[in-house]
Every structure is written in structure tokens, then in C-alpha cells.
Amino acid sequence: MNITTLVFILLSLLAVGSAIMMITSKSPVHSVLWLIVVFFAISGHYILMNAQFLAIVNIIVYAGAIMVLFLFVVMLMNLNKETEPVKNYRLQLIGVVSGGCLLLIILSAIMKIDTQQLVEMKVGDAGLIQSLGKNLFTNYVLPFEISSVLFLSAMIGAVVIGKKD
Amino acid sequence: MDIKSYIALALTLFTIGIIGVLVRRNAIIIFMCVELMLNAVNLLLVAFSKMHALSTAAKASVNYASDAQIFVFFIMVVAAAEVSVGLAIIVMMYRNVHTVDVNFLNRLKN
């Protein structure tokens, strides 16, 4: 087993285990922190595939901005274990069983495909800032500008929804 | 690395997100599970882009393999906008109902 496979398996176990801890932990603050661990593991996967720009953006935007926003909201509302909603164990069991069935069915369908396609690891310039930037500002410059309008409308929407009236 | 192992990993993360949406009653945690599903899709897009970089068509054109990573970038942009509006809605709901339990959001039912 070479080192790339070992790192892949370690990062995958970290991501899946932290995701399971996220949906099972009682306190919302612990859930937010476990989700940050998942995002760091996914960033590790990006670095392993030499998608450096996306790895950095994933850490800055998701772990840095979005999860801090979640943490602010959780702390603003003073949520903890006592305010956690009451559980219905029968519905929980149904949810877990149906989700597991979905996973098993799609996984078995995908494992039946006899493809030998490999993923390029650790090399390649498709994910470097130079090639991504050239592509973004030539072919995708219109969606890039439209996304700024999207951000403006989202900001106005958040202010309008959140203000006291 | 085989593409199938990346498909299996992304599928597992996506299913954990689905189970979280089905099981949890806390609106913030449901929202976080949606973020987890978006990230699973992002991981799969990057894996497919790097799979495509090995093909012969990718050698001819420079932009061929980086298109999928541009899509991931736009998914992140839309997710950031979505989170700001969604968290504003959740804060507004907490101010009105004084809980984040989604079971109490049944006013449209009757």
C-alpha cells in the first residue's frame, strides 16, 4: 500500500467519522465543530488531488466564513442540550433505515460498473490558480459578474428579513 | 486512485447528510446537513475533473479539466449567499416562535 492510498483512507475515515459525529452529537456547538473537521478533511482530499485553489477557498469560505456564521447564530440563540427538541425514536429509526437503504442500493449499482478509470493524484495543473483564473476570466466571466449581483441581492435579503419591524 | 472509491466516499457523505435531514429536528443542524451534501457533491466534481485530466481530449485543450472546478467555485458562491439568507430566516423564526424545532412550523397545515 503506497502513501497516497494511506492518506486517502485516513482522510476518508476522518470525514465520514466526523460527519457521523456531527449528526449524532446533542449540542449544536459540537455539531458545528465536527462539521468544521469534515470540511478540513475534504480540503485535504482537494490537496491530495492537487486542486490547490479549491482547497484554500474551501477552508476560507466554508470553515472560515460560513461555519463562523453558524457558530454566531448558535451562540446568539443560546442553544444547548436542554433546548434540544424532543425526539421521536420511531421516526429516527425510519430515517436511518431509509437512508441506509439508499446508500446500499446506489453503492451496489455503482460497484457493478466495470470501469478502470483512474483519478490523477498529486500532479496536474487543472486545479492551479493560473489555469483556473484564465478559464474563469475568459469563458466564465458573465456568470462571475452575475454572482456578484446574487451576493448583493442576498445581502439585501438578509438585512430585510433580519431587521426588527 | 480508482474513481469508484471517490464515488463511494462522496455517496457516503451525501447519505449521512440525508439521514441528518430526516432524523434531526433542530433547524440549524438540518441546514448544516444541507451544507454537508453540497460538499459531497463538490468533492465528486473535483474527482471527476481530475479523472478527466487523464483523458486524451484533455491534453488538447487547457481548459478542459478545469471547467468542473469552476463549477465547484460557483457552488461555493451560491452556498455562501444561501447561508446568509437561510440563517436570517432561522433567526427570524427563533424570534417569533422562540424555538428552532421544525415540528412547531406547522402553521400552513391547517
Image: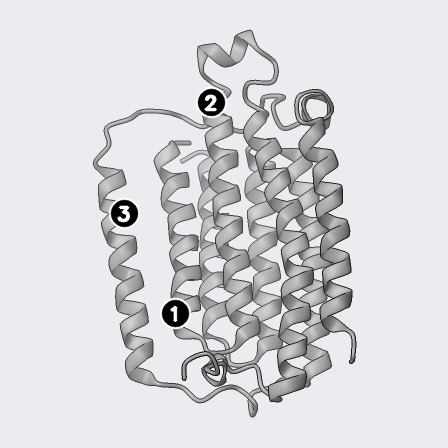
- Binning the other alpha carbons within 10 Å of mark 2 as few (below 14), some (14 to 19) or many (20 upward) gives many
What amino acid is labelled 2 in the image? Answer: His
Pointer 3 and pointer 2 on the same chain: no
For this rendering, which residue is in front, A156 or B68?
A: A156
Disc 3 crowd rating (10 Å Cα; few below 14, some 14-19, many 20+) is few
For the residues bearing labels 1 and 3, Cβ distance under 8 angstroms? no
Between the C-alphas of marks 2 and 1, the distance is: 34 Å
Q: Earlier in the sequence, mark 2 or mark 1?
A: 1
* Amino acid type for the residue under numbered disc 3: Ile
Is the residue under label 2 in contact with that under label 3 (CB below 8 Å)? no
Query: Mark 3 falls within which chain?
Result: A
The front one of A7 and B12 is B12
> CB of mark 2 within 8 Å of CB of mark 1?
no
Q: Secondary structure at mark 2?
A: helix
Please name the residue shown 51% across and 42% down the image: B43
**Where is mark 1, residue-wise?**
B22
Q: Is residue A64 visible?
A: yes
**Between marks 3 and 2, how big is the CA–CA gap?**
22 Å
10 Å crowding of disc 1: few (<14), some (14-19), many (20+): some
**Residue A52 x, y percent position in the rendering:** 66, 34
What residue do we see at 72% from left, 27% from top?
Answer: A141
**Any mark on residue A124, and which?**
none
Q: Residue B35: image x %, image y %?
A: 55, 57
The disc labelled 1 sits on which kind of residue?
A: Leu
| 3D distance between C-alphas at marks 1 and 3 | 18 Å
Parent chain of label 1:
B
Write down the residue under mark 3.
A106
In the picture, the disc for residue B52 is 2
